[in-house]
Image (cartoon, coloured by chain):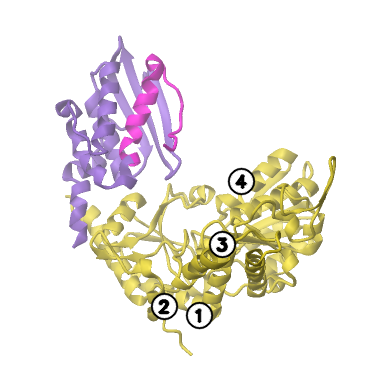
Amino acid sequence: MALTKLDQLYRAVILDHSKNPRRRGVLDKATTQIELKNPTCGDVIQVQMAIEENIITDVRFEGSGCTISMSSASMMTDAILGKSIEDALMLADEFSGVVQGEEAEHKHELGDAMMLSGVSKFPARIKCATLSWKALEKALEADGTGVDGQLKHD
Amino acid sequence: MTVPYEELRKDFKILDQHVNDEPLVYLDNAATSQKPEAVLKTVEDYYHTSNANVHRGVHTLAERATVQYEGSREKVRRFINAPDTSEVLFTRGTTTSLNWVARSLGDEIVERGDDIVISYMEHHSNIIPWQQLAKRKGANLKYIELTDEGMLDMADLKKKITENTKIVSLTHVSNVLGVVNPIREITDYVHEKGGIMVVDGAQAVPHMPVDVQALDADFYAFSGHKMMAPTGIGVLHGKRKWLEQMEPLEFGGEMIDFVELQDSTWKELPWKFEAGTPNIAGAIGLGAAIDYLENVGMSGIMDHEQNLVAYLMPKLEEIDGLTLFGPKKASDRTGVIAFNIDGVHPHDVATAMDMEGVAVRAGHHCAQPLMTYLNQPATARASFYLYNTIADADKFVEALKATKEFFLDGLD
């Protein structure tokens, strides 16, 4: 049956992050926050961060979306917690390559997010996987002072 | 005579393929339909034998192209029973048609404080032109409520449409709920109150007989690509008295009568609205699509789709955790079925079904206010057409069950 191919995309780790998301919720003291929408499908995500001396000391996300976008957000929080702004942006850039079938240099730092590499075989779903990372990038622009934004069509 | 719908499949080569190693079951017809060989061949033949610009030039090809282009207009007229071809304007599609009415007539007659009435089930293309018009003019945009089954709440409709209402614009058939609205009844009410009735027929004309004189609406808009014609061609039917009053929105070649240095005059209807070289091949393709649909028979197509829905509904209702939107009775709707599996996002549903070869749409269906109204971020949608069969319906149910199982039972 063709659904077995779905296993390439929906690995157990991904389904687990979707069912039991890490750091879903809101921060009491966020220094940076952003809401990003994907206008093609209606997904919406909020990312909040506490940044102290250039280090992301805490992070939360909230939103509504599919398995891929929500699990990706959960995995992202795992990957960027405790990282500097520069390192987080570097991982965001690498992740964007991973879901388009490129090799990653920092597999260990990306952690569970590497499990989303299968998305590259489902081009229509790449945007789902990158939504939270795009939000992160936008939030960290201007030295992490944060801006509101909407995901643009490429 | 019973039409052998299974046989019609052979007219659509695109349907004869495998997607993700499974036979393709195309159920995204509300987005766009496939095109039969007859339409593709007509367009190809036109380019091979008759391509020239229309309405200018005396040479033979120019004459051939013009005859075919205007011949298509006559086919459209007959198909929707318009009184005259002067009332049949070729546009880019429903969106352009509705924008023209809002921009041209809307700007002329709507004033500050007037009401424009639409409903919660409208497609964005029948919301935003009116929203923008209301903003330009300081008018009020009002939305008719829906019943629990997703039909227009007629009591609310009668409250919202008053003597203060200048324009009412409603869809004939919802692209999400599949519900068929009682356009004639509403049109009579709008006219009684002195308003203008505009109808978005994009999801109706491909699937059922439409008679614009029987409906009596002031404007009726639809697209070619959802009824087997190429993309980029559509129609606006308008009553002559309004079209004559309306100014064209585009100016240039084709639409002029005389051009002087400081002033110009326009051609008569319908050409005054068709500036520039039109989508000639598209219009001719639309004519061929109408020939194809008429040959199959429009009332038969409607029956065929309703039979498929009637066959499907009990099977779908049996599936635990499946929410269906829209009317329960097959006779109240077309072959559009919006649904959600509890706990599974529609995008995941659409990807999973695609792996089974079943093409369905997921998202907000260009109807975000309706999604908000239904309290759903998005839904999945299957939409059937004349080439879909009972076998397709069975495959759809099977893929749906497998999808549900994959996401809900696959993980403890």
Callouts 1 and 4 on one subunit: yes
Q: Judging from the image, what secondary structure is the residue with disc 2 in?
A: helix
Chain containing mark 4: B
Say left or right for B209 vs B349: right
Which badge, 4 or 3, comes first in the chain's sequence?
A: 4
Which chain is yellow in the picture?
A: B
**Structural crowding at the residue carrying mark 4, measured as other residues with C-alpha within 10 Å and reported as few (<14), some (14–19) or many (≥20):** some
**What secondary structure is the magenta-colored segment mainly?**
helix
Say left or right for B248 vs B317: right
Foreground: disc 4 or disc 2: 2
> In the rendered image, is residue A39 in sight?
yes
Q: CA distance from mark 1 to mark 2?
A: 9 Å
Highlighted range, magenta: A127-154
Residue A73 is a magenta residue: no
Foreground: disc 4 or disc 3: 3
- The residue lying toward the viewer, choosing from A20 and B49, is B49
- Residue bearing the label numbered 2: B8
Q: Against B405, is B368 above or below?
A: above
Q: Judging from the image, what secondary structure is the residue with disc 1 in?
A: helix
Which badge, 4 or 2, comes first in the chain's sequence?
A: 2
Asked which quadrant contains residue B49, the reply is bottom right
Q: CA distance from mark 1 to mark 4?
A: 35 Å
- Residue bearing the label numbered 1: B296
- The residue lying toward the viewer, choosing from B130 and B57, is B57
- Residue bearing the label numbered 3: B281
Callouts 2 and 3 on one subunit: yes
Say left or right for B272 vs A32: right
